[in-house]
Amino acid sequence: MKLTHITLATGLLAMAGFASAQSNVSLYGVADVGLTKITGQKAQLLSSGTQNNGTSRWGMRGNEDLGGGLKASFNFEAQLSLLNGASAANLFARQANMSLGGGFGTLKAGRALTPSWYGVMAWELTGSANYSVVSSQFGYGGVNSRHNAEVSYTSPKMGGLTVTVGHLFAPNNGDVAKNDLNIIYKAGPLGASLVYNKVENKGKNMALGASYDFGSFKLAGSWQDATGGGLGKGFTLGGSVPLGAITITADLARDTQKKDTDAMLEVKYALSKRTLVYGVLLRNGTGKTKTAVNSTMVGLRHNF
């Protein structure tokens, strides 16, 4: 009997080892806090704000190898404020989705980052910093960074080229269907994308952008038409220079219709691969009739 128990226990341990090898779950997140001074306001501590480099958050993601090149994945992500420990009203408001991927590409469903967001990230210089002037002026191809109840398909990479198509069914989006598309090319020093999205029987948005890394510096620019999303039409232009542990980035976004220019100067110092100190000067233009809002931010970000 004792031998039987030992054999059974050994079998269960072997099965557990096989299961853990087939699937995994990881915890990750960002902690970001800083001191900011905004036009007309007193200096204040800020976390998960528009002047922070990133939104403080924590999340869980995992996948299971189903065999034959097929993989099932999930991602849950929650926002967090370091000022008081509060979360967003909807706990996993940043990500709540699952996907199935293989040689055919990847199918994803749930609340997720939009195809337009991924398209802009193919060339945007700050890596989607909260103070990015590209997003403050034009959004991400004229839309928010996330969609609820989105179903998307991403093709396999074809010589550096991928295509993602997203769709929101009308009953999930106020009885209005919505489509979102990106075409991304990334190879060597070049990153480029075309973004297109449209609300059924309403406006459409487009963005075409690219970046090129020359080694000693990187340049990026884009043409934007975000009028379908109630935003502007114009262009962005910027550059980034790495100097050892320091990276200096300057970027501007010009709405040629409203005569409105947003501008940013960012300095980042890497304390390690996961921790950085950053300083930002930000100008949020408000057109010809109003005074621009200027802000200064010094902050600390840690990825885990």
Image (cartoon, rainbow, N blue to C red):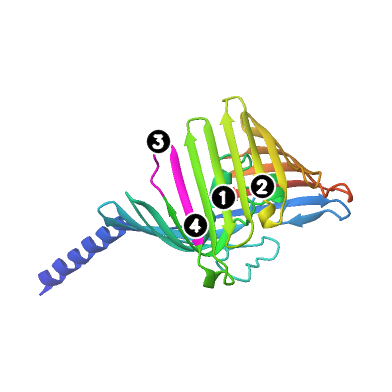
Q: Residue 196, labelled with which disc? A: 1
- Classify mark 1: helix, strand or loop: strand
The earlier-in-sequence mark between 4 and 1 is 4
The residue that appears at 60% across and 55% down in the rendered structure is 145
The residue that appears at 50% across and 42% down in the rendered structure is 184
The earlier-in-sequence mark between 1 and 2 is 1
The earlier-in-sequence mark between 4 and 2 is 4
| Label 3, label 4: how far apart the Cα atoms are | 22 Å
Q: Residue 225, labelled with which disc? A: 2
Q: Position of residue 19 (x, y in %)?
A: 28, 61
In the rendered structure, which segment of residues is drawn in magenta?
155-167
Nearer to us in this view, 279 or 216:
216
- Quarter location, residue 193: top right
- Mark 4, other Cα within 10 Å: few <14 / some 14–19 / many ≥20: many
Look at the numbered discs 4 and 1 and tell me whether their residues touch, using CB distance below 8 Å.
no
Q: Disc 3 marks which residue?
A: 159
Nearer to us in this view, 110 or 152:
152
Q: Is residue 304 visible?
A: no
- For badge 4, the amino acid type reads Gly
Residue furthest out toward the front: 201
- Classify mark 3: helix, strand or loop: loop
- For badge 2, the amino acid type reads Asp
- Which of label 3 and label 1 is nearer to you? 1
Q: Disc 4 marks which residue?
A: 166
- Residue 158 is inside the magenta segment: yes
The earlier-in-sequence mark between 3 and 4 is 3
The residue that appears at 71% across and 53% down in the rendered structure is 231
- Mark 2, other Cα within 10 Å: few <14 / some 14–19 / many ≥20: many
Residue furthest out toward the bottom: 1
